[in-house]
Image (cartoon, helix red, strand yellow):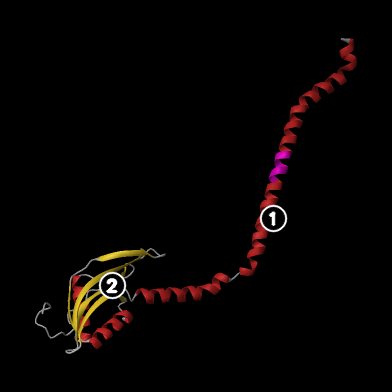
Amino acid sequence: MRFLAKYWKALLALVLAAAAIPVVMKTREAEEEHRARVQSMESSIALLQSAIDGNMPYAGVQERLEPELLALQESREALYSRFPSTLLEEDQIRYILYLEETFGTEIHFSFSSNMPMTQLNDGSILGGVTLAVNFETTYEGFKEMVNYIATDSKTASVRYATINYDAENDAATGTMVITVYTLSATEYTAPEPSEYETGKTTIFE
């Protein structure tokens, strides 16, 4: 007892020191964790500042791009407007009558279905109706018809053609395969009944 009474302060200090060890260790762990978080945040801030500095030369680009983007959209819409959404049977008949009347050409054909070809970046489907046409015309009429189809605003192309020419009678007969292109981005417009004046009593003459 005398020993405890004499050295109680030292013993108390030892007890308190032993009790303080876990607290000190936890404090150190917390400090290290805090220091690591600070370093991580400083690194993130540095990266963000670097990104901001790198993007500063492009400040205001979006505002400058808006007129260009609008012009691009208008150009796309103007291009798309040249394509029909599809060609139903009545549209195919009208197209052939259109060619007959324009060139004075006798044409026979069979109906075809719209077939998808490729998907564009905006999701629209570019397709086409391929018509096999049997024609009777003059040689000059044949050349004019091929040139017209290739440059027509209806966006069509001649895939291939065969021709038999009678020079004595200037008669050109043969077969032509025409693809009229379509685009799913446009709305279907039915043909006007009086669009072409053919002078025929029926469309099968």
Instruction: Tell me, for residue 57, which label it has, or none.
Output: none
Which is nearer the eye, 150 or 167? 167
Name the residue that disc number 1 marks: 46
- Residue 159 to residue 136: above or below: above
Element at label 1: helix
Would residue 84 appear left or right of 133 to someone viewing this image? right
Q: Which residues are magenta?
A: 32-37
Q: How many marks?
A: 2
Residue 17 higher or lower than 202, as above or below: above
Query: Residue 139 lies in what quarter of the image?
Result: bottom left
169, 7: nearer the viewer: 169
**Can you tell which quarter of the image residue 60 is in?**
bottom right
Residue at image point 21% right, 70% down: 88
Q: Residues within 10 Å of mark 1 (few under 14, many from 20)?
A: few
Residue at 26 percent of width and 71 percent of height = 188
Residue at mark 2: 179
Above or below residue 37? Residue 184 is below
In this rendering, the label closer to the viewer, 1 or 2 = 2
Q: Nearer the viewer, residue 41 or 160?
A: 160
| Amino acid at the residue labelled 2 | Thr
Based on the picture, tell me whether residue 189 belongs to the magenta stretch.
Answer: no
In the image, residue 12 above or below residue 145: above
Residue shown at 74% from the left, 28% from the top = 22
Q: Return the residue nearer the eye: 90 or 50.
A: 90
The amino acid type of the residue labelled 1 equals: Ala
